[in-house]
Structure formats: C-alpha cells, structure tokens
Amino acid sequence: MAGVQLTAVAGLVRELLREEAPARIAALTEELFQEARSVLEQDRGAAALEPRVEEGAISLWNWAVTKHTSSVVNDEQKAKLRFVACRLVCLCEGSDPPEATIRRQILMSMKTGKGWIDIGKPDLADEFLEIAVSSIEKLYVKLVEGSGGEADIHVHKADVEKNLFKVLSYQAESAVAQGDFQKAVMCVQRCKDMLMKLPKETCYLSILCYNFGVQTYELKRYEQSSFWLSQSYDIGKMDMKYSLGKEMRAKVLRLLATAYFEWDCNLYLDRALKAVSLANQEDLHPAGFFLKVKILLKSGASDEDINSAVAEFLHHEMPLDFCLNAAKLLLEHGRESVGFDFLKSVSERFESSPNHGRITLLHIEFLLQSKRELLAKQKVEEIIIGYYTGKQLLPEALNQLHIILWDMAAKHYEAKGYSEALHWYNYSVSFYTPGQIDQNLAKLQRNMASCYLHLKQVDKAKEAVKEAERCDPNNIFTKFSIYKIAVMEKDTNKAVEAVIEMVKLAEKSSQREDKLRGEENMGTNLLSLAAQIALENEQQDVAIKALEYLAEHLQDCRQLFAALKCLVRLTLSKVVAENEEKDEDINSMLTYLTLAHKRLAEPFTGEKFTGDMKILEAHWFRKVAWNLAVQLRGCPGKMRDFFLLSFKLSQFCPSDKAVLIAQKTCLLMAAAVDLEMGRQPVPRSEQMELLSQALQHVQACKEIWKVLKLTGDFAKDPTDTLLLLYEFEARSKLNDPALHNFMESVWEQPQIEVKTLEIIASLAMESPARYPILCKKALKSALNLHRKQSVIDVENFSKCLHSLINLSLPTGLTDLDACVLQEAWDYFEDGLSIISSTDAYPEMEILWLMTRAWNTGIFQHTIGKCREAEQWCGLGMRFLSHLGSLKKTYEGHMVGLYSEVLDKLDRAKGSLSNEQE
C-alpha cells in the first residue's frame, strides 16, 4: 500500500509540472498537499528505491519558486508545494546520505518552515524546523568524522552554527506566533549565546526581539512585550559595530516605556520614565518628549516636574504640531496653568510663522472649554483686528475658526440664548467681504435669520434671508427660511409658494445620482417641520401642501400614515367649516385614500412597522372611506369610488365577520350605483362599462357572501335577492349570452319571492333589455305564487295580471293568432275567478280588464269575426257586473252595443242556415 500511495503522489507531481492553467494548478496543488500529508514514514524504503521520486521533488521545488516569482502560485500554494517537495526528499534519504544531500535537506526544511510561519500557520512549521535541527546535527557529525584536526573542527562548527542560529530564530518566531513564551525565550537565549561567534547577527536578533515586542504589545501582553523590548535593547548594545542605529534603539525604548505605561503606570512609573529618558538620550525625537509628558501627567506629577518636561520642547525647538499636541495634552488633563503658560511661550516662539493662527485657535478652544467666554471673545476680536491689518489666517485655520464660532452660536441657540448666538455668528460674518457669494455665508445668514425670528425681529430676519437668497438662491433651507417668515406674517400665499418651491427642490435632490448620504431625508424632514409650523399657526392650506409631498415621498411607514391621516382630517375639517362638499376636496380625499391603499399594498420590512400596525391603519382608512361614501349620496360616482376603496382597504384586515359584512355591503353598494348610473341617459359605450363593472362587483360579492353565510344565520338577509336582481339586470342589459343559463338556476330556486319575480319581469323589458319570454315566465310564476297564498294580495295580483295581459295581448296588432287569444282569454278568466272571490280587487283594474276584453271583442266584430266578437264582448259584460260605482257609466252603452253584436251574430247564423238548405 505504501508504494501505491507514493506512486500516486509522484504521478500528481509529474502532472503538475506539465500544467499551465492556473485553475488546474490550484486544484492539483491542493490534491498533492492532501496526498503528501498522508504519506507515512513507512514509505521511506519505497522512496529510497525510486530515484525518480527525489528528482521529481527537486523539480517541484524549483518549479514552485519559478511560478511564485511569475505570480502563477500564491504564497500559500508555494508553502504547500515546498511541503510536498521537502517531505519527498526526506523520504528519499538513505541510511548514510552524502554531505550535499544533508545540506540540501537543511535548506529545504528551513525554507519550508519559514514559509508556513510567513503565511500565519506556524504549527505546520515546527515539524520541518525539527527536521532542520536534526539534519544540522547529522551534518556536524559527518563533518567532524571527515576532519583532519582541531582547526577543521572549529571551521565546521562555525559553518553549522550559522544554520542552527537561523533555525532557532525561526523556532522562536513560531513559538511567539503560537503563544509559547517559554519556548521562544529558550530559543532566543540560545541565539543570544551564539552571538559571540556570530556578531554580524546582532542586528538581526535585536530586530527580531523588537518585532516580538510589537506583536505581544498589540495583543496587550505587556509583560511579555516589555521582556522582548528589553532584550532587543540589550542585544542591540552587545556589539556596537553590528548593533542597531541610535534612532532604532530610541524607538525600541519608547515602545518599552509605552508598554510599562499601559501595563500599570503607577507600578512601573520609574521603569517607564527611565526607558523614555534613555530614548531621549539616544535620539532627540518629539515623540519621546511627548511620551514623557504623557507619563508624568498620568502619574500625577507636580506642575514643576511637568513644566520642566515641557520646557524641553522649546529648548530643543520641537515642531509646532508636537507643541500643540503637548498643549492639548496638558489642558485635557486639567493642567491649565502649565498649559496656558506653555501656549504663551509657543506663541512667542512661532510669532512669525504663517501657522501662528493655529496656536491662537487652540487657545480659544480651551478658553471656551474652561467657560472663559469673555477671554475667548477677546482672542477672537484680536484675530479679527489682525485679519484686517494684514495678519490673515491660513484658509485651514480660518475654516477651523468658523467651526468654533458656529459651534458656540449653536450652543447658545439650543439654550435659547438667541442674542448671544447672534454675537458669535456676527464674529463669523466679520471674515466675509461685502458682496461675497459663498454657500457657507448663505447658511450663516439663515442661522442668523432663525435667531432674529425667535427675537421677533422680523425685518432683520428678512434682511438676513435676502442675503442668503443672494448667495444660494436654489437652496431648500433658504426657501424654508422664507417660508417661516411668511407663516409668521400670516402671508398664506407666500407660504404656499415657498412650500411649492421646497417640494420642487426636494424632488430635484431625490433624483440626483450624486446625492450625499442623508440628503434623501433632508427634504422630507424639512417639509415635516413646515407642516408642523403651519398647523401650529392654524394655516391649513399651507400644511396640506407640505403633507401632500410627505405622503408621496416618506419611506418610514409610521410617518407616512401619520401624514396621510393628518391630510384626511384637515380636508374633512375644511369640508365641515365650508359646510359644503367641494369637488376639489372630495377628489383630494380620494387621492389620499388611494395612496394609503397603494402604500399598504407595498411590502414592508423592519421592526418599526409591524403587521398589527398595518391592520390598524387599514381599519382606520377603510372606515373613513365608508363614512365618506355614505355622506355622498348626491354624487353616485364618488360614492361608488369610496365604497370600492373601503372594500380594497378592508382586504388588509383579518376576514372576521364584521369585515366580511362591510366588504359585502361595499360591493353591493358599488354594484347598485353602477346599475343606477347605467339607467341614466348615457352613451351606450359608457353604459356597457358601467354594467360590466356592476357584474364584476356582483361576482366578487358572491364569493364573499359564500364565506359569510358560514359564520351565522342570515335567513332574513336580502343579499341573495339583491345579488340575483343585480346580476339579472347587468346580464340582460349587456345582452349576455349566459343570461338564459343563469335564469335556469333562478327558476329552480324553491323559495323565490313574488316581489323578486315581478322585478325580474320589469327589468326584462327595461331598455336596452328586451326579453318578453323571460318577462312572461316571471309574471306567470308570480301569479302562481299569488294563488298559493292563504290570503291573496289582490292589489299586487292585479298589477301582475295587468302586465301579463299587456305582454300577451299587445295593442295595435290587427291579426292575432287563435293561440294568442286563447292564452289571453285564460288570463282574463284568472282575473274573473279572483274578482268573484273578493271585494278588494281594485275597481280601476276591473274597469281596465273589462275595457281590454270589450275592445278585443269590438275589434273582432269589425273584422267580421262575429263569434269571437260575441265571446270577448260577453267576457267584457261579465267584468261589467263586478263594477261598483262606475257600472252605470258604462252599462247602457255596452248593453246596446252588445245587443247589436248578438243581432249581427244571429243574422250571420241565419244566412249560414239558408245556404245550407
């Protein structure tokens, strides 16, 4: 098995050496590394017997170096390939390898170990560094065995010690990286012991210890750091010929002092001061003096000791930056006396420097921090005087001064000290020349305008805003300042104009691709404030303009719906105040509620707007829409729109019984309105659209009604009837091909009411619908239901019969089929049967039936149908007998005419008999 695994590794090596594609090289490198890690010591024999393994390993080593140089393989891949090559070479080692083989193995093991350390995997380095030590020992034994005397032995020993020194230093690096302090100390000590024979390595070992000190300092292992830094300094002094330079020694000492300082300043104060003093002796560097002052301050040293330390800054002519930092340090630690005296000395020393203003600025800053505003003002006034007498500040210093002045003004503004804030702003204005155009000056003037407004000095505020507008006319904050003044002066028109300008600028800013972070909310924040100011000053029209923009652009859902609610309330209050419903206000309400629906439909994220909040908002807006719909009975179109909005908003609410009832009612009302509007004289295309919409509402309502009926008893609810009638009207007037199928299901309903059938009959003939067959069927069904009643509703029965006879016996027709006459005859007989059984039948209806029957008979008489004439006139005479007060009016005339009809009929019969004889 051993030979097989080794053969696989060798095969992968050969394949890799031929490969050029970077991706394949990376894959083969990883595979080779994993395979090589599993090759065990037992493979040694097989490797020794196969010379091509060693050749392949050496080729792989050289290939990795070449490819790394040309950036084909990275540092980690190079380390892995060296790992493979070194392991294979070690396995190929025989029982008595030659000197060259051992030296090669030492070199490869050292470089492999160092490679793992450099890429941050020191644990993988240890094995190879141990191999290197073992190989060095073998080399020494071999060299001693072949030496010719004592002199040769010393030469060989020196040769071996160079490599051993390197390996030990690498082992120290690995130990430090793995946190093994004791091992690292032991390795460094062995290296230190070897320096007498290898003095040229002094600098290398000193820097190595310094690096260990830096690493452990960064890990806050101050005890270890102080040890390594002390070692670095001590080693650096062992041989001055090969030691570190004085600058590096001072750097080591400063870090050592810092390590003591941060470890425990009170406990190791003396060591820290000693280290930093030595550093300053080695090399005069500002950082050393600064550190010394820092340590003294931390230790609570007296002002006298600190004065002595800072005097060295001036004595050794340290740079201005270090002097300023030292002054800051003193003042931040509350050493004001020393600090201000030091600043005074620094000011005198750098009197002619162009950076002298920085000293004064620092002086002002600390005067303000120590609440000495009067002294700070004197310093500012000195700068202003100097500014106009040739001692101008550098641009950077001037900017810093403006920041200080504005900060002080803002501080007083927040504390409502508006006059004092103006004082500091005026200092800032002093540095601008008349007519200068600058955006910062515009901002300054706006800030001053705010102060003037708080002080009720409107005219001065106007002047300041005018100046701001001159400098930066297209700035939203400038428009906001104009707006505030307009509101204060109750100039509604100007305030609205300002809001419109702010909206335009906010929209323009939101469309910019290069907008700064935070700019997106600037417009909405300002307009929110504008709306608030308008409301506080009872200027509703102005507030509405601002809120309308916010409702469109706010991203925060809670703020958005708050703005929409405010808009709704404001508009409602306008309607109430004006005591009329203006189209403009109603349209606005429709817009706001539609926007609420749109935003509720959008997905939302974050914890600020929860699902429960969404439901609450939906309920609020749907109820508003419902109430508006109810109030708009005089505007059917708007009423329908609000009912539909209420329905749509309710879809964001849980489908409990109350919500389902509301949804059902909204859709029923919307369908009813569409049908009613469709009955009006409108173009056919518009009528078709209204009827189609009504049908859609009915279909949606039917689905909700199915669910709702499962929640309780709705036996007395008229919804089924309304849905039936609405659907019939819509389909019939649309001339819908599905109408007849729909009516089949209606006829099958067991409990359909008479009234419903009568309405169906009426609708079936209502323009543009014309379905006489359906109408007749509905009327017949209605008559049947009337007859089945225990007490017949005579009045409704008479109306139903009236309609049915009108439909069956149309007026104006000259030739009626016998079947048609027979059908009509049956209806008259039905009427007589009911009339005969009750005195409640309306007399006018009896008169109408009598007249229709009589006129039909007379018509038959005129066309020579005597027998039919006698029948129908006789039918009319039967109705005559049931007339009350009107009987006498018609009886004489009808009896005479009826006699003529009978005589004519008798003569016709006589003529017929003679012909037959």
Image: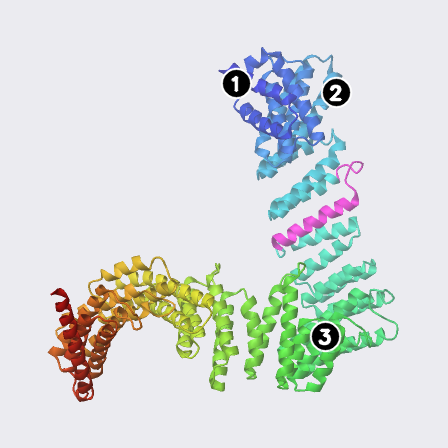
Q: Which mark is residue 524?
A: none
Secondary structure beneath disc 2?
helix
From where the camera sits, is residue 376 visible? Answer: no
Where residue 487 appears, x then y in whole percent?
62, 83
**CA separation, marks 1 and 3?**
80 Å
Look at the picture and state if 20 lies above or below 819.
above
Tell me which amino acid carries mark 3. Answer: Leu
The kind of secondary structure element at disc 3 is helix
Label 1 crowd (10 A; few <14 / some 14-19 / many >=20): some
Front one among 10 and 571: 571
Read off the residue under disc 3.
444
Q: CA distance from mark 3 to mark 2?
A: 82 Å
Q: Nearer the viewer, mark 3 or mark 2?
A: 3
Question: Residue 707 vs residue 562: left or right?
Answer: left
Which amino acid type corresponds to the residue marked 1 in the rendered image? Answer: Gln
Mark 2, residue position: 155
Q: Which residue is mark 1?
A: 5
Question: Depth check: 556 or 773 in front?
Answer: 773
Q: Identify the magenta region.
A: 237-264
Contact (Cβ within 8 Å) of mark 2 with mark 1: no
Against 140, residue 432 (above or below) is below
Q: Earlier in the sequence, mark 2 or mark 1?
A: 1
